[in-house]
Amino acid sequence: MDRFALARLNRWLQRIPGFGQWLKLSQQVYQAEEILHDRRRCVRRAG
């Protein structure tokens, strides 16, 4: 998939009411999970 098609898809998805907010929320959740996994790895190493 090229960047232009991806940008067009993004624009289309942003028109859906509430989708932009949901996307932001899901990204935050994903980042939070990544951080938690990193912390667990650090704890395992320390332990």
Image (cartoon, grey):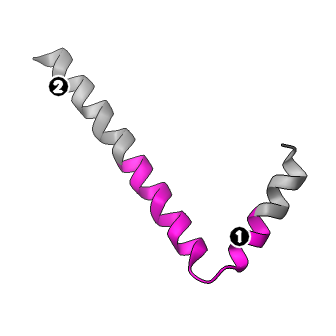
| SS at badge 2 | helix
Picture layout, residue 28 above or below residue 14? above
> What amino acid does circle 1 point to?
Leu
Mark 2, Cα crowd under 10 Å, few <14 / some 14-19 / many 20+, is few
> What amino acid does circle 2 point to?
Val
Horizontal side of residue 9 vs 32, given as left or right: right
Horizontal side of residue 18 vs 13, given as left or right: left
Are circles 2 and 1 on residues that touch, CB within 8 Å? no
**In this view, the mark in front (2 or 1):** 1
Magenta region: 10-32
Picture layout, residue 23 above or below residue 29? below
Q: Position of residue 22 (x, y in %)?
A: 51, 70
Q: Position of residue 12 (x, y in %)?
A: 78, 71
Mark 1, Cα crowd under 10 Å, few <14 / some 14-19 / many 20+, is some
Residue 13, image quadrant: bottom right
Q: Position of residue 30 (x, y in %)?
A: 43, 49
Quadrant of the rendering where the N terminus is positioned: top right
Question: Sequence-wise, which precedes: disc 2 or disc 1?
Answer: 1
Residue lying at 49% horizontally and 56% vertically, measured from the top left: 27
Quadrant of the rendering where the C terminus is positioned: top left
Q: Position of residue 26 (x, y in %)?
A: 47, 59
Q: CA distance from mark 2 to mark 1?
A: 39 Å
Q: Which residue is mark 2?
A: 43
The image's mark for residue 28 is none
Residue lying at 85% horizontally and 48% vertically, measured from the top left: 3
The image's mark for residue 13 is 1
Instruction: Check residue 23 for magenta coloring.
Output: yes
What kind of secondary structure does the magenta stretch mostly adopt? Answer: helix
Number of numbered callouts drawn: 2
Instruction: Check residue 17 for magenta coloring.
Output: yes
